[in-house]
Amino acid sequence: MTLEARGIECTRGRRHLFSNLSFSLRPGDCFELRGPNGSGKTSLLRMLCGLVPPTTGTILWHGESLSSASAKTSSTG
């Protein structure tokens, strides 16, 4: 079981919050997310939950893109 981000980017309106963010988390790993207000922490968490897509890049859960996994869920829901 893994959660992987590959080159993700977040833009809100004209504001560029982060870009080229990549990481991989496995069972037992710890992920600390820190930054000033408005730096994109909540936006990143929403992306990792599959609630919003990244501007660019891919987020994988168990090797499958979150966007394709959410499409399957909504079509069977």
Image (cartoon, rainbow, N blue to C red):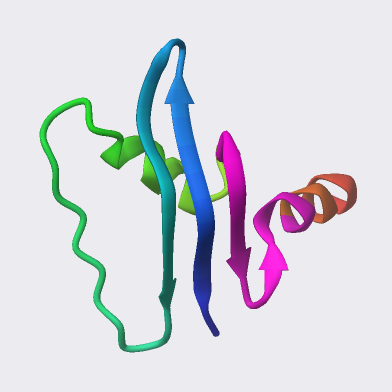
Query: Residue at the location (30% across, 35% down)?
Result: 40
Q: Nearer the viewer, residue 56 or 73?
A: 56
Which residue occupies 21% across, 55% down? 33
Q: Residue furthest right?
A: 75
- 72 versus 75 height, above or below: below
Residue displayed at 41% across by 53% down: 21
Residue 66 shown in magenta: yes
Where residue 56 sits in the image (x, y, percent)?
A: 60, 40
Question: Compared with residue 15, is residue 45 higher up or lower down, i.e. above or below?
Answer: below
Q: Which residues are magenta?
A: 53-69
Corner quadrant of residue 51: top right
Tell me residue 62's x, y (percent): 63, 77
| Membership of 71 in magenta stretch | no
Percent x, y for residue 37?
14, 28
Q: Residue furthest left?
A: 36
User: In which quadrant of the rendered view does residue 17 lie?
Assistant: top left
Residue placed most toward the observer, 21 or 71: 21
